Image (cartoon, rainbow, N blue to C red):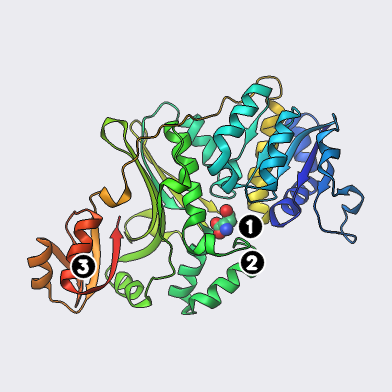
Amino acid sequence: MAKIAIMGFGTVGAGVAEVARMNRDVIASRLGEEVYVKYILDVRDFADSPYADRMIKDFSIIENDPEVEVVVESIGGAKVALDFTRRALLAGKHVVTSNKELVATHGRELLEIAREKNVNYLFEASVGGGIPVLRPLFQCLAGNEIEEIYGILNGTTNYILTRMVKGGISFADALKEAQAKGYAEKDPTADVEGIDAGRKICILSDLAWGKEVSPAEISMEGISSIHLKDVDIAAAAGYRIKLLGRALRLEGGRQAAYVAPHLVSESCPIATVDDVFNGIMIRGNAVGDVMFYGRGAGDLPTASAVMGDVIDAIQHRAKRRDLGWSQGADLVAAADLPMRWYLRGDFSLDDARTVCGQAEELAQGAVITGTMTEVEAKAAAEKLGAVSMLRVL
Ligand code: HSE
């Protein structure tokens, strides 16, 4: 029997306990031994929980119990979670997490400790919720040079955008719904302003190219300033507005990563990813485009990925999975990437062509420009008096 501890009994932690209970037999038959939740650590009281007898408040009980092999960290944030993760790894325990903030900001250091202590630090659930995407990236696609990754990495904002377009409800009401369903972060700013998606695109970049890209280094823009009018114009012209995380490998091994809303043509499969679902496209130089799709948030989907890592950690007790990345990514700013832009304002197509050189009309006063950098697009938007400016994938 493999004994595990869960730290943090919120949406994800409770989901992990539930998956361990509901799938106990199938997990035991696959692994050849049962996975037993010995402790659940939380500062709150859960007197009525079926796990009340295993609830503890003192981390050192887990740290000092040699029977606990795997610790699931679902506390979130990068303070207490960082301290407990470091200590659990130093105590020789495998750690599995869904905590994208911690992996994106301290993953390199924690993986280094895991390497020194010969244990696993696994974080499949930190990107794409229940979608298997990190393991396919670092394992199944290891024979490729990864050229580009882009996708919908935040379920809350995708849910909000979908409900606004299809349900005609306000941004505030859609956000409340997402929070009630347990998709949003405690502070929804991280979702709405693109920070959560930013952490995830950093983790994908770290694994794809082996160089650390930290959230502080990249530009992140959310959906709070999207106008419904632009959503409607885009839809009528065959585009959907989606919040995308995007990472690219450029010439000479340089890299770029950013988060921003984009117009995505309906002919691209990513445009059809709705509600809380995430969709991630990875382009490898041998495989071409591969898309990963599924539930990007929620208790059981996220717990599914966590439990997969718990099983993998136990299967790699003796020979750990060799994961890690170094410092020194050579980053190009998102503002310097040439791309097409959507501009809307009180201008004619002729005006747009005079200013931008090239422009395709989507509606009266709404165009898609030719390829230009953000600085050039901003200058064009200013000359045209544009009120909206968005990237086009
Ligand atoms: N708040 C996140 C989201 C949870 O909405 O995608 C999953 O990481």
**Number of the front mark, 3 or 1:** 3
- Which kind of residue does numbered mark 1 sit on? Gly
Q: Which residue is mark 3?
A: 381
Tell me which image quadrant ligand 1 sits in.
bottom right
Locate residue 342, reporting x and y percent.
25, 65
Residue with the most extreme top position: 318
Q: Nearer the viewer, residue 232 or 204?
A: 204
Give how far apart the Cα atoms at labels 1 and 2 are: 8 Å
Residue drawn at 49 percent across, 30 percent down: 325
Mark 1 and 2 residues: CB-CB less than 8 Å, in contact? Answer: yes
Residue carrying label 2: 181
Q: CA distance from mark 3 to mark 1?
A: 39 Å
Q: Image quadrant of residue 328?
A: top left
Report helix, strand or loop for mark 2.
loop
**Toward the viewer: 333 or 163?**
333
Residue drawn 10% across the image and 65% down it:
355
* 170 relative to 19 in the view: left or right: left
Q: Which residue sits at x=7%, y=67%?
A: 354
Q: Which residue is mark 1?
A: 298
Q: Kindly tell me whether mark 1's CB lies below 8 Å from ligand 1.
A: yes
Position of residue 31 measured from the top left corner of the image (x, y, whole percent): 74, 31
Secondary structure category for the residue under label 1: loop
Relative side of 19 to 189, left or right? right
Rendered position, 40 above or below 159: above
What residue is shown at x 34% (from left), y 30% (from top)? Answer: 286
